[in-house]
Image (spheres, grey):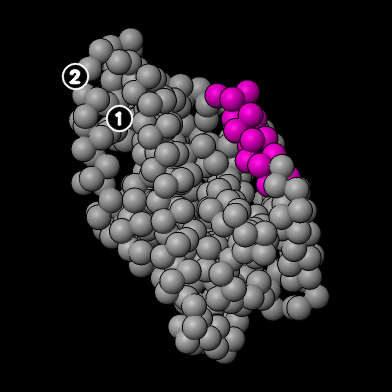
Amino acid sequence: MLIALYFFMVGIKFIESGFILALGCGAKSAFSIADNPLAGLVIGTVSTALLHSSSTITSITVTLVASQGLTVRQGVYIVMGANIGTCVTCIVVAFGQIQSRSRFQRAMETAAVHTMFNLWSVFIMFPLEIIAHPLERLSVLLSHSKASGGEFGSPVDAVITPFANLIIQVDKETIYAITAGTKECTSDTSLLVGGAFKGTSLSDGQVGATVVVIGFFTLACSLIWFVQMLAKVFLGPTKVLVSRMLAFNGYVNIAAGTIITFIVQSSTVVTCTLTPMAGLGVFTLEQVYPLIVGANLGTCGTTLLASLVVGDSHAVAVALTHFWFNFFGIILFYPVAFMRRPILSWARSVAFFSASWVVVGIAFILMTYLIALVFF
C-alpha cells in the first residue's frame, strides 16, 4: 500500500515538474496579469489545478512579493485561488473508485466537501477582502513582529524527489528568479538541469508535455493499486476501530489533520489518502470534514516557512494571509452546526449527481483544464 502511495506522489511530482518546465519563461507573464482581484483568484486557482501543488504556487507568490514583483494585496487573491485549485487532485483520486457507484459517491463526497469548504470561504472572504482588506491588514500588522527561521524540508519531498529526478529535474530557483524579475529569460535558457531527458534534442516544452503524460499514467495506475490495497486493509476490525477513533471529537480531528499535514508538509498526501478511505466507508462525511479543514490549516506551514527563509516582512504577510484565510474559514464553517449544512449538503449533491451521471464529475475537471489553456 505504501509503495502504491509512493508512486501516486511520484505521479503528482511528474505533473508538477512537467507543467513548470512547459510553462518556463511564461511564468512571469502568467503572474503579471494579477492586476485585479478576480484575475489573481483565477491565476491561483488555475495554476494550482495544473501543478497539483498549492505549496509551489504560494511559494512563488511569496517570492514575487518579497522581490516587489507583486503587492501583498495581489498576493492575497492568488493565495485564495490556490486553495480552490488544490481541490482538483482529490476529485481525480475519487475517480479511482468509479467501478463501484456507492464507493465512488462516498469518495466524491469527501472530494467535494474539500472543494465546498474552500469555495464557501472564498464566497464570504473574497468580497470582504475587496471592500475592507481584513486579511491583508491583520497579516501586515503581525508580519512586523516576525522571527527569522530556518527551512524545514518536507519528508515527502525528501523521499520522492530522488526517484523523480531520475526522470526530470527542474531548476526551480531559476524559475523563481525569472518570475520575480531578477533574472532574464533568453531563447537559450533551459530549466531542465537533469534526468533522463537531459541532453536530448527535445525542447523544454516538449519534455514538459511528455513528463505530464507520464505523470498522469503513473497517477492512474498507482491510484487503482492504492484503492485495492486499502480495500484489503480496511475491511473488518480495522475499519471499525478507525471509525470509532474519529467519532470521538471533531476538534481533535481538526488538530490531527493540522499536525499530520504540517509534519508531512503536504495536504495532498493527507486528503488524497482520506478520499479513497471514505469511499470504502471507513468514516462518514461528518467525520472526515474536520480532518480536511485541519489539513487545509496544516499546509499553511509550508508557506510560512518559505516566507521566513526569504526574510521579508511583506512575504511573511502573504504567508499569514494563507493561514488566516483557512483559520477564519474554520471559524465560519465548523463550530456552528447550522453553518456546516450548506457545505455538507452541497458536497452530497455533487457526489450524488456525479455517481448518477459520471459526466458531472468529469466536466468539473475538464472545465478547469480548458480554462487553464485559455489563460496559459
**Number of the label disc, if any, that sits on residue 199:** 2
Crowd rating for badge 2 (residues with CA inside 10 Å; few <14, some 14–19, many 20+):
few
Was residue 375 drawn as part of the magenta stretch in this picture?
Answer: yes
In the picture, measured across the screen, residue 326 lies left or right of residue 229, that is right
- Residue 176 visible within the image: no
**288 over 356 or under it: above or below:** below
The residue depicted at 52 percent of the width and 68 percent of the height is: 277
Q: Position of residue 309 (x, y in %)?
A: 31, 51
The residue shown at (55%, 62%) is 275
Q: Nearer the viewer, residue 109 or 323?
A: 109
Type of amino acid under label 1: Thr
Seen at 47% across and 31% down, the residue is 69
- Which secondary structure lies at badge 2? loop
Task: Report the amino acid beneath label 2.
Answer: Gly
The residue where tag 1 is placed is 174
The image quadrant of residue 121 is bottom right
* Residue lying furthest top: 187
Prevailing secondary structure of the magenta residues? helix
Quadrant assignment for the C terminus? top right
Q: Is residue 7 magenta?
A: no
Q: Position of residue 197 (x, y in %)?
A: 24, 25
Query: In the picture shown, does residue 144 fall above or below 371?
Result: below
The image shows residue 273 at horizontal and vertical percentages of 47, 63
- Residue at the spot x=78%, y=65% of the render? 345
The crowding category of the residue bearing disc 1, from other C-alpha atoms within 10 Å (few below 14, some 14 to 19, many at least 20), is some
Of the pair 113 and 334, the residue shown nearer to us: 113
Q: Nearer the viewer, mark 1 or mark 2?
A: 2
Part of the protein shown in magenta: 360-376
Query: Tag 1, which secondary structure?
Result: helix
State the quadrant of the N terminus.
Answer: bottom left
